[in-house]
Image: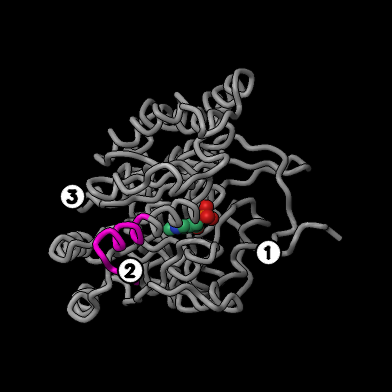
Amino acid sequence: MSHVMSTYARQPLAFTRGEGVFLIDADGKRYLDALAGVAVISVGHCHPKLAKAISDQAHSLIHTSNIFHITLQEKLADRLCALSGMDNAFFCNSGCEANEAAIKLARLYGHKKGIDVPTIIVTEGSFHGRTMATLTATGSRKVQAGFEPLLAGFARVPYDDVEAVRHVAANNKNVVAMLVEPITGEGGIHIPAENYLRELRAICDQNGWLLMLDEVQTGIGRTGKWFGHQHSGILPDVMPLAKGLGGGMPIGACLAAGPAAKLFEPGKHGSTFGGNPLACAAALAVLDIIEEERLIENAASAGAYLVGRLHDELSSLQGFVQIRAKGLMIGIELDRNCGELVGQALERGLIINVTADNVVRLVPPLSFGVEHADLLLSTLVPLIRGFLAGTPARSAA
Ligand SMILES: Cc1ncc(COP(=O)(O)O)c(C=O)c1O
């Protein structure tokens, strides 16, 4: 019996090594990793340049404290602001912490405007994390159940519904911000209408609200641009990041622009570990690798290839609903719960994930090439075919 708390229904498997887009278990069996630690392993497992950056940094300085200047943190903030057009960054260790920072910024912003109960609009089907504030913001009863009382100060609207946001704007004078994912991740890879973010930007501007885009999953190249909102040509006021930023090292960031960038002052927020030299060295190496190896372009092209082939192979099948994808953030919706595909794929050496019960999610490393896509297809397509036909699937491998 393990002494680890049972917060996850774990697969009966542990890996001992990682190599690019592959994970290897204790018996030496190789698995093609189309999950990437849930969209974390941006540059591939154990990329030599990332491993070297972490190792070199570990030999010179691991941690000091945010009581002092941290040169690498300042460098990372500069890089992220240059890539995004944002003004500054707060560093933490995870996605929920990055969202916590965003929520605190929104509340400070509201109080500064004289609003006593600042309210943040959030959406149905969203996922923002597991802390009390972020699970309150999350649009899933499953995530919230048992943790009541939830926090005050959130108003919920359907995702991809601009009219609902306008309705809240007309009726709730306490709103100070909207927190929304550019594409839902855990909620099932839902891609909003082309104009959604632009319209939200306009509503936020008209009402003096902060537009806060949770780019924890969509950020750092995942969708074929540095940040998911860059497909829409707008800028957020606040942008939480994590996952792919550290390539597997725990690091989160909350970027802010304009008035939101000036709200935190000493004593208002903090983190013991946030942005320490080791984590920042890793994140800087990740950004270098993404640029040097043109991984964002690769995410766009490999994603388009994979999605094209998936369409060809799956779209005529009874039980196939839809593929929703941007870059290497891909959801294959089936008409029935398909969690069992995860274990079947593992047996065949493929790591996938199912989210929202009936959506196969593929979020492989951004270094996933066409040859890896072909390997994935050779396992996944027969598996889904067999599953939808109600017969045990054969592997084509
Ligand atoms: C969009 C989004 N926000 C926040 C989080 C929470 O991140 P973390 O698990 O690092 O706290 C996740 C995690 O899946 C996410 O997908």
Residue depicted at x 60% and y 34%:
19
Q: Is mark 1 within 8 Å of ligand 1?
A: no
Would residue 302 be visible to someone looking at this image? Answer: no
Residue 118's mark? 2
Q: Label 2 near label 1: C-beta < 8 Å?
A: no
Give the structural element (helix, strand or loop) at label 3: loop
Q: Mark 1 Cα within 10 Å, few/some/many (few <14, many 20+)?
A: few
Using the rendered view, name the quadrant where residue 60 is placed.
Answer: top right
Q: For the magenta stretch, what is the residue range?
A: 105-119
The numbered dot on residue 233 is 3
> Which numbered disc, 3 or 1, marks the residue that appears first in the sequence?
1
The x, y position of residue 5, in whole percent, is: 75, 61
Q: Name the residue beneath numbered marker 1.
A: 7
- Kind of residue at badge 2: Pro
Question: Considering depth in this image, is 248 or 154 the residue closer to the camera?
Answer: 154
Q: CA distance from mark 3 to mark 2?
A: 28 Å
